[in-house]
Image (cartoon, rainbow, N blue to C red):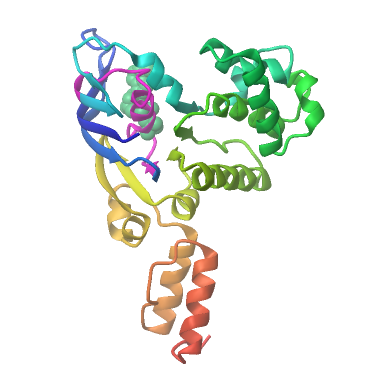
């Protein structure tokens, strides 16, 4: 499902003395099957955009296209429900929304609510528990008896149980330790590749945006100022600095090496692994004295 924001504006508490403009003229196209990161300084409008992606918020101006559904400012929208089912959002700290007595019931809740049979909902829960590398006996436990990392996975399983075709991730690793962070990000990447799941990652981590996404959009002061490939976005530090953002560590390190060498490596290295390979290649060519 392609997603398109066309000249979208949004004001909180519109028409009241507390009106607060959060988005201006946002244009952003997210192609079906892509891995799109949305980055930007705090307050730049990322969460507000995110809440438009399954019509939790409706635009004050402009149009949002979610597949065939068009949501226009000021117009009533019908048939949102089937679209909501296809766009799963993993909010920050999703485990705070767990509430059922058992993990099984929690994972089944969404599908049952959307008319999926109990047998099918349970089948999905069992598959997901395995996919998310949770122990099989977790299904009968209370979600509140699990570790923080396990609770996060159960909450994610609840979103995936809806079998969305678009997955929106809002800082999905916030509060996890480095190992937990990496495992969860790898898992989303695997789902993206295996199921062709359109993935939209809202993140503060330049490292995660650089490592996993194809396209990176920058939000700045309420509007989308750039949407380009990860190489393009992260290879231009001057432009990033204008939006109060830094390049990922691998790129920063690459620039230091390049200044020592006195010449550039052949491409922007988005990860430490890419940088190691580029240095090895440069050495083979006899150009790097490292
Ligand atoms: P980000 O996710 O990039 O930090 P937000 O979308 O949360 O940015 O915020 C964009 C702007 O909207 C900010 O100026 C913020 O203060 C304001 N804002 C966010 N949520 C609300 C709200 N519920 N009511 C009023 N203003 C809000």
Q: Is residue 54 magenta?
A: yes
Residue 229 located left or right of residue 6: right
Classify residue 185 by image quadrant: top right
**Ligand 1, image quadrant it occupies:** top left
Classify residue 41 by image quadrant: top left
> As rendered, which of 178 and 61 lies closer to the eye?
61
The furthest residue to the right = 137
The count of marks equals: 0
Picture layout, residue 202 above or below residue 193:
above
Picture layout, residue 155 above or below residue 284:
above
Q: Residue at x 36, y 60 (%)?
A: 231
Q: Residue at x 45, y 50 (%)?
A: 206
The segment highlighted magenta reads 37-62
Q: Is residue 15 magenta?
A: no
Residue 127 located left or right of residue 233: right
> As rendered, which of 215 and 32 lies closer to the eye?
32
Residue 13 located left or right of residue 270: left
Q: Quadrant of the N terminus?
A: top left
Position of residue 140 measured from the top left corner of the image (x, y, whole percent): 79, 19
The furthest residue to the bottom = 286
Q: Residue at x 39, y 52 (%)?
A: 214
Position of residue 283 measured from the top left corner of the image (x, y, whole percent): 50, 87
Position of residue 63 measured from the top left corner of the image (x, y, whole percent): 20, 25
């Amino acid at each position: 499902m392609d997603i398109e924001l066309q000249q979208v504006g949004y004001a909180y508490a519109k028409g009241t003395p507390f009106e607060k403009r959060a988005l201006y003229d946002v244009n952003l196209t997210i192609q079906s099957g892509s891995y799109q990161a949305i980055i930007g300084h705090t307050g730049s409008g990322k969460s507000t955009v995110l809440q438009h992606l399954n019509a939790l918020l409706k635009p004050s101006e402009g149009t949002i296209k979610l597949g065939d559904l068009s949501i226009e400012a000021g117009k009533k929208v019908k048939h949102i429900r089937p679209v909501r089912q296809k766009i799963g959002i993993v909010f920050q700290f999703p485990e705070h929304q767990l509430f059922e007595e058992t993990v099984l019931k929690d994972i089944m809740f969404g599908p049952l609510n959307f008319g999926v049979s109990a047998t099918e909902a349970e089948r999905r829960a069992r598959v997901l528990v395995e996919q998310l590398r949770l122990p099989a006996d977790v299904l009968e436990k209370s979600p509140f008896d699990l570790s923080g990392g396990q609770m996060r996975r159960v909450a994610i399983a609840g979103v995936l149980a809806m079998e969305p075709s678009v997955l929106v991730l809002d800082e999905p690793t916030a509060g996890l330790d480095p190992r937990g962070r990496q495992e969860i990000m790898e898992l989303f990447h695997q789902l993206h590749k295996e199921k062709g799941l359109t993935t939209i990652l809202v993140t503060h981590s330049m490292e995660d945006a650089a490592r996993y996404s194809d396209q990176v959009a920058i939000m700045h002061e309420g509007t989308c100022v750039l949407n380009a490939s990860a190489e393009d976005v992260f290879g231009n530090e001057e432009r990033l600095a204008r939006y109060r953002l830094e390049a990922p560590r691998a790129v920063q390190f690459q620039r230091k090496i390049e200044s020592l060498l006195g010449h550039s490596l052949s491409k922007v290295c988005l990860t430490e692994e890419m940088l190691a390979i580029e240095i090895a290649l440069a050495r083979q060519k006899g150009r790097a004295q490292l």
